Image (spheres, coloured by chain):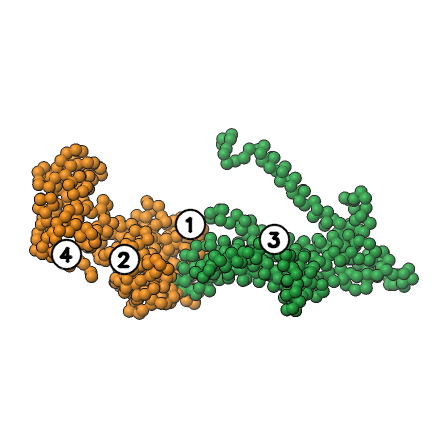
Chain colours: A green, B orange
Amino acid sequence: MSAWSVTEPSARSKGIAAVLVILYTVITLLPLVWIIATGFKTGPDSISYPPKVIFQPSLEGYVNLFTDRTRATPEQLAAMPPPENFVDEIVQRRGEVITQPSKFGARFLNSVIIGFGSTFLSIFLGTLAAYAFSRFRVPLKDDLLFFILSTRMMPPIAVAIPIFLMFRQLGLSDTHLGMILLYTGVNISLAVWLLKGFIDEIPREYEEAALIDGYTRLQAFRKVVLPQAATGIASTAIFCLIFAWNEYAFAFLLTSGTAQTAPPFIPTIFGVGGKDWPAVAAGATLFLLPVMIFTILLRKHLLRGITFGAVRK
Amino acid sequence: MAEIVIRNLRKEFGDFVAVKESSFTVGDGEFFMLLGPSGCGKTTTLRMIAGLELPTSGQILIDGEDVSQKPASQRDIAFVFQMFALYPHLNVRRNISYPLVSQGLPRADVRAKVAEVARILGIESILDKPVGGLSGGDRQRVALGRAIVRSPKAFMMDEPLGALDAEFREHMSEELRALHDRMGATTVYVTHDQLEAMQMGDKIVVMNHGVVEQFGTPQEIYDHPATMFVADFIGSPPMNFLRFEGGFRPGDRSVSLGGTAIATPELREEAAGRKLALGVRPEHIAMLDDGPYRGRIEAVEYLGTTQIVTLSTPHGTLKARTPSDRAARVGETVGLGFAASTLVLFDAGSGRAFRTAANAGVFHG
């Protein structure tokens, strides 16, 4: 072994790199950790000064998140049966009674339906379009591709008012379908361009081999192209989902009830008797989970997706 | 197995004509070479036979049936790609069985056929490996396995040895030829390597700029090139051309090069005052101590039993392949003898060979 190598970094530079990475990780994760921690604090703990790092964990935030409550008089409280479970116990201890489940569950489900629905639709249409652009002689191909990309050349919110009016005319306001179409419309250009890049990388010969082997073009696409485009599809899906999941402005503008997603709903949690920070933090924590799980599940693909083209297999 | 007939095949890509009115016949069980420099249309022709491109006009008949507008999947043809195109997400066994699965063959039959093919190719030990880690030779064998497993009517091979290193090509080309001899399958093989074509082929089509220059057995093409392109493309070093102006009449048995009569096969055509080229293969030039036609030795390359001697003559530079025991010194002037029966006369303008008693029976159209 040589003392010095071109390819192997020295112990010192490895050490410096490690310190930088750890520092960056701490800085990045701190707000996340703080939000997650706040979700498990009581109301007073969450706003105490100086902030409490060590605290008695409580599920108060989560209980508040999923319930609507009202203050009870001491007589009412005395008349009530002893609490049957931890939820009742937490509520009664603060002198409140549950009136009904909150809307958070429904809003969260809306986010799931709209987020994953639009992601699926973007990927489905995007893959077909990208394949066509990649493999066939499409008339005006370059112009069409530019046109598709041009839909991303301004911030989507710039067209908020026309879209608001269009949605009202078409009866799409506050519907799942409307939001799925809207997010698909925004994401599809990204999907087409990203996926075209991935499909361009797949040699045609694989499909041609399948055609020769007796498969139709559609079968060749499904059995040969799709498995090899899996990496690209996975990473594109993550990008699409992250956008649709986090989108706030259009959701705030176009949804108010049945199709309202979690982002515009969470700020409305500030409820009875002051700002309920633990409930907001609990909502934010739960809201983080699906994208986090989705990304972790597909992370192997994502990493390969980011470096695609740069690394020859 | 099948006979493949190509009639007036033409392919245009926009304004570019890749293949111009080509016609030839691949006999049943023949090992047929499509030879030419890159961009000559040989791969496009192969892809049209396989059904990966549809011809602009013309006919392709496989076993008498016109398949020119049919999709590849209905032609019952196997294709071996230069980069092998093994499905990277499947292992060796599944790669080989893929064409059978599309036919809906029962699983037991598929297993039996794959096992048989693996035995023929000697790849039984790697059947369950992923294709990613295979060596070039094994990939080649798997690609061949996928081609032969369903006993198609014909095999198309697009420079299948191009991706292998030189040492291994030799071995694989022998293996390929042996496999063909055992199976007797009609094979159309594209290559730009004239040695490979001569070595392996029963018949060769030489293409250039989308045109079939010549079609025949390796020996016909080597001995009796139909055009100057073929003469120059085949052979290493290629055929020499002595360029001169002159003429001849049917029945003549010699031409006059700067006043020196050079014996040729009996001529069957007529030419007068034309730019001509006399073609002579390097091995058909003898260095003599005397002789009316003389050349000066410019360079000598020693190759063991033979040597390549570069000579300058009044009509151009020649390369002669002579036995090494005849000493050749640079600067020396020697007499040159040409083996009369092997000479070919070309029209230097069009590049076409004139008919003589030697090549009269060879030309197809």
Type of amino acid at the residue the image marks with label 4? Arg
Q: Chain of mark 3?
A: A
Question: Which residue is the site of mark 4?
Answer: B355
Question: How many numbered markers are drawn?
Answer: 4
Could you tell me if the residues under marks 4 and 1 are in contact, i.e. CB atoms within 8 Å? no
Of pointers 4 and 2, the one earlier in the residue sequence? 2
Q: Are the residues under marks 3 and 4 on the same chain?
A: no
Residue located at (25% from left, 49% from top): B233
- Marks 2 and 3, how far apart at CA: 56 Å
- Tell me: B247 left or right of B14: left
Residue A295 badge: 3
* x and y percentages locating residue B74 in the rendered image: 38, 67
Secondary structure, mark 3, is helix
- Tell me: B254 left or right of B115: left
Q: Quadrant of residue A54?
A: top right
If the image is split into quadrants, where does the N terminus of chain B sit? bottom left
Question: Which-is-in-front pick, marks 3 and 4?
Answer: 4
Q: Chain of mark 2?
A: B
Question: Which residue is the site of mark 2?
Answer: B211
